[in-house]
Amino acid sequence: MSIDDLDGVFAALADPMRRQLLDELVGRGEASASALAVVVPVSRQAVLKHLNVLDDAGLVTARRSGREVLYRARPERLQATAARMSELAARWDERLDQIKRIAES
């Protein structure tokens, strides 16, 4: 996962409404913007804008079902982000261990 990909995911998750919509999709499996607008305090149009940001970040996917567009969370994108963050944390731990060894010698 590239830095640009990570930036997109973090920017999308920075907004509490988008996190709430993502949580709702994880719980439901899939839902339309209209169905999601019922459970959040914003309009359907605002929900659509948030879903577009989540889609651009690769956190949700959309599919047409008749006249509706149904959205589904993409947990693999969050898993890839978590894996990348774990790699970065491990690198920092290694660097801190090196600094500690140098300081103690």
Image: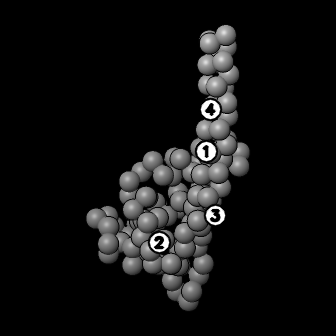
Can you say whether 40 is above or below 28 in the image?
A: above
Q: Quadrant of residue 100?
A: top right
> Amino acid under label 2?
Leu
Residue for badge 4 = 93
Mark 1 residue element:
helix
- Amino acid type of the residue tagged 1 in the rendering: Met
Q: CA distance from mark 3 to mark 1?
A: 14 Å
Q: CA distance from mark 1 to mark 2?
A: 23 Å
Q: Earlier in the sequence, mark 4 or mark 1?
A: 1
Q: Which residue appears farthest toward the right when viewing the image?
A: 2
Disc 2 is placed on an element classified as helix
Amino acid type, mark 3? Glu
Which three-letter amino acid code belongs to the residue tagged 4? Answer: Asp
Q: Is residue 9 above or below residue 100?
A: below
In this rendering, position of residue 33 left or right of residue 63: left
Residue appearing at x 65%, y 55% in the figure: 80
User: For numbered disc 3, what is the local secondary structure?
Assistant: helix
Left or right relative to 86: residue 71: left
